[in-house]
Image (cartoon, rainbow, N blue to C red):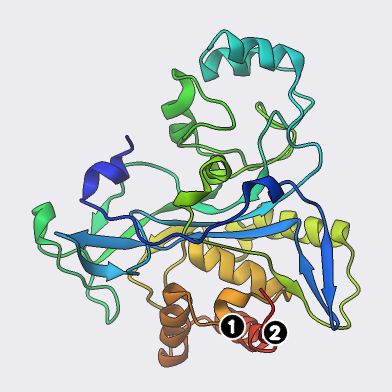
Amino acid sequence: MSNWENFITTVTGTTVPNNPDEQSRVLTCAKDGYKKLDWLRICRIPLRVSIRDITIFGSDSGDFPGHYWVEIIHGDENNIDAHIQKARSAKQTEKEIIKLGNVKSANGFRESYGWYPTNFPIKITIEQTAYSYATVEATGIKKIEFFKQEGIVNGASNSRIGEDANEYHDHTTKREAGRKTMYNNLSKYAFDPHQYQRFKEEDINMISNPYLPPGDTRTKETIIQQIRDFASTFHSRHSAIWSWYNDSYDEVNCHTFLFLLLGKLGLADVIIRDNKDTHFTKYLAALEKSKKADKTRKDLLTNLKNLSLKIPRGYY
């Protein structure tokens, strides 16, 4: 059990059913000029912090600590190198498997991207801001103003990798660290630690496929490369920090990473169209209200909202 789970009592919210038999499809469906990208999945577990089944902050349909990430479905993701399969059968530790080297296949890991703090436990820092106050008596801490930590794509920090090193892990097990680069020491694909949850999708509260708007002629290969470029440069172009400020204008975490990614790529999202994402609604409202808000973030999220609202009703 992670330190996050030990931090506070949580309640799992309602989930959206998905068909696991279709999770490896690589299709693009076109409807009246809108193209549904079935090979690209947006996965959401909204944050919910609760005490005695009462939501203190976050979404009633969420969980703690929550996470947002994006998945790219490849036809070869289930291929496993023979020597890796042999080591897994022997239940070797991750450290032992890494030493084998010679990684050529996906080894079951789905390419995916999300934004994480580098270390656990998160340091709690006190700061007076308009949007970041919450009272959580059960923790013995009177005020949680915000969480702030150095950030990294896919939680691929040395400290997180060290947490996994002496345990058995494969693509179906829960882990602390993913990998942020292609052809890393576990897989040919970069991957978010949460990608394992495709094997237990009942725990993912919301799953959707984005839409490409009419007139957009980008190919699948182009979009995939744009996602990789966004993830690899997020630290330098957007933020080197992971932070949570209760949906304040100045936070940067997994859900703001996802919103900025969709906005940057010009993709539309039915969850945003249907106003089902509390984090998006609160974060955009905070950006619009604050004079200190980053203009690029505000513009990207505004464009994402406007583009999503144009998806015709009946498209899911």
Q: In this view, does 272 lie above or below 201?
A: below
| Tag 1: amino acid | Arg
- Name the quadrant containing residue 251: bottom left
Within 10 Å of the Cα at label 2, are there few (<14), some (14-19), or many (20+) other Cα atoms?
some
- Which residue is more in the foreground, 127 or 25? 25
Q: Which mark is residue 273?
A: 1
Q: Mark 2 points at which residue?
A: 311
Q: Is mark 1 on a helix, strand or loop?
A: helix
Give the residue displayed 43% in from the left and 73% down from the top.
279
Q: Which mark is residue 102?
A: none
- Name the quadrant containing residue 286: bottom left
Q: In this view, does 287 lie above or below 137?
A: below
Give the residue displayed 63% in from the left and 81% down from the top.
304
| Tag 2: amino acid | Ile
Give the residue displayed 58% in from the left and 45% down from the top.
198
Residue sticking out furthest to the top: 90
Image quarter hosting the C terminus: bottom right
**Residue 56: where, in percent of width, then height?**
21, 68
Left or right, 312 with reference to 63 = right
